[in-house]
């Protein structure tokens, strides 16, 4: 089968096409004939071995696929790597049937980024009716869904940040009340101004570095900052307990992998997201479709922030 394999860690340049043996499913697993694979920011960390879980070489990256099982079911599934290929093995309990009316790209947008957005708001931030929500990278795969879900879940004011006017306009179209520049310089003040001069209740943060620091400083008493990424590759300033106590603030980490296998944390929210997409209440944004052979280009564009929404690899090309 055709696949994208890495034999050394590094940047996008280490992603190379290769011919590999078909994977063989073991107990509790199913083989998926892949039609499309999703690209996530976490994949860029996995390729350079800077992710939360360490990788071993050689490696076929890719954590999500959509395709057909041997018995003809159309499924979307999380994978333990191996997604950038014509065939992938997945755990049966992580394969979710895709309803009619949901495209491959939409399904892929939901299985990592949609579930992440759902849990950021529901599980980690515990959003309450009327609270203000800041969504960083609001035109990205997770951010664009978080904006829409925050509106559905009753947010009082949604403040989006993005790096360009086009991305800010998209966030407004998706339901944000205001969209501001994402630059860390002066961000604390812009967030407060965007919330009518008040500190904010919830921040969904995946950049790290000074953006994290400014977001924490903008939190209201009992506010929650949920951190789920480190896109800048720059760690934030270390936090002292007194900083949190002084304002009754919370910093919550989130990693989707901890939801897998826990009752009510995978299949149920996934079913809700797919149903919302099928009936038009949720609009996953597809930002680009690349041939499998151009996986490196997809990583380059993602790291350079040239993209929005969900990036897809078309495995047939």
Image (spheres, helix red, strand yellow):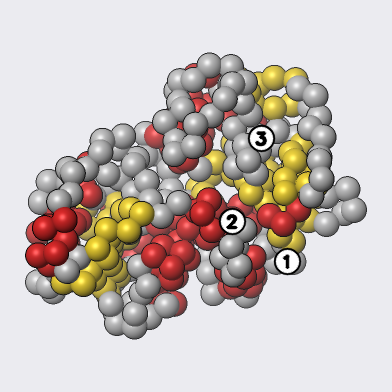
Give the quadrant of residue 31. Answer: top right
Viewer-closest of 274 and 59 = 59
Residue at x 66% of width, y 35% of height: 82
The relative height of residue 212 versus residue 110 in the rendered view (above or below) is: above
**Sequence-earlier tag: 1 or 2:** 1
Question: Residue 200, percent across and down?
Answer: 20, 69
Image coordinates of residue 259 in percent, x first then y, are: 54, 58
Q: Residue at x 64, y 65 (%)?
A: 267
Q: Is residue 169 visible?
A: no
Q: State the CA–CA distance, disc 1 to disc 3.
A: 24 Å
Which x, y percent locates residue 172? 34, 65
Apparent side of residue 86 relative to residue 245 in the rendered image (left or right): right
Q: Earlier in the sequence, mark 3 or mark 2?
A: 3
For the residue labelled by badge 3, is the local secondary structure a helix, a strand or a loop? Answer: loop
Tell me the number on the disc at residue 292. Answer: none
Residue wearing tag 1: 99
Q: Is residue 224 above or below residue 7?
A: below
CA gap, disc 3 to disc 2? 18 Å
Residue occupying image coordinates x 36% and y 61%: 171
- Between residues 56 and 32, which one lies in front from this camera angle? 56
Question: Is 144 situated above or below 282?
Answer: above
**Quadrant of the rendered image containing residue 291:** top right
Q: Residues within 10 Å of mark 3 (few under 14, many from 20)?
A: many
Discs 3, 2 touching: Cβ within 8 Å: no
Kindly indicate whether the residue at mark 2 contacts the one at mark 1 (C-beta within 8 angstroms). no
Q: Residue 260 got which mark? A: 2
Pointer 1 with pointer 3, Cβ within 8 A: no
Residue 101 appears left or right of 156: right
User: What residue did someone put label 3 on?
Assistant: 82
Q: Residues within 10 Å of mark 1 (few under 14, many from 20)?
A: some
Labels 1, 3: front one: 3
> Crowding near pointer 2: few (<14 within 10 Å), some, many (20+)?
some
């Amino acid at each position: 089968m055709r696949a994208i394999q890495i034999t050394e860690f590094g940047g996008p340049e280490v992603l190379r096409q290769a011919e590999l043996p078909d994977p063989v499913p073991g107990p509790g697993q199913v083989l998926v004939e892949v039609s499309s694979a999703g690209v996530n920011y976490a994949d860029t960390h996995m390729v350079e071995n800077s992710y939360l879980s360490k990788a071993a070489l050689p490696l076929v990256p890719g954590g999500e696929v959509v395709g057909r099982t041997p018995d003809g079911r159309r499924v979307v599934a999380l994978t333990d790597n191996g997604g950038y290929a014509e065939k992938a093995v997945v755990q049966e309990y992580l394969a979710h049937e895709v309803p009619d009316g949901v495209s491959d790209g939409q399904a892929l947008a939901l299985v990592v980024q949609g579930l992440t957005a759902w849990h950021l708001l529901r599980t980690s931030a515990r959003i309450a009716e009327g609270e203000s929500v800041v969504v960083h990278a609001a035109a990205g795969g997770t951010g664009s869904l978080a904006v829409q879900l925050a509106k559905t879940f009753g947010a009082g004011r949604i403040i989006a940040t993005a790096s360009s006017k086009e991305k800010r306009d998209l966030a407004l179209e998706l339901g944000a009340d205001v969209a501001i520049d994402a630059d860390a310089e002066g961000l604390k003040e812009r967030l407060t101004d965007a919330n009518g001069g008040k500190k904010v209740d919830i921040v969904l943060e995946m950049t790290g570095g000074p953006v994290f620091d400014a977001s924490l400083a903008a939190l209201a008493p009992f506010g929650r900052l949920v951190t789920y990424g480190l896109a800048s590759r720059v760690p934030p300033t270390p936090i002292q307990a007194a900083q949190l106590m002084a304002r009754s603030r919370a910093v919550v980490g989130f990693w989707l992998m901890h939801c897998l296998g826990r009752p009510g944390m995978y299949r149920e929210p996934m079913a809700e997201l797919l149903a919302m997409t099928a009936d038009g209440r949720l609009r996953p944004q597809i930002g680009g479709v690349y041939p499998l052979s151009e996986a490196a280009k997809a990583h380059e564009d993602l790291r350079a922030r040239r993209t929005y929404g969900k990036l897809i690899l078309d495995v047939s090309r």
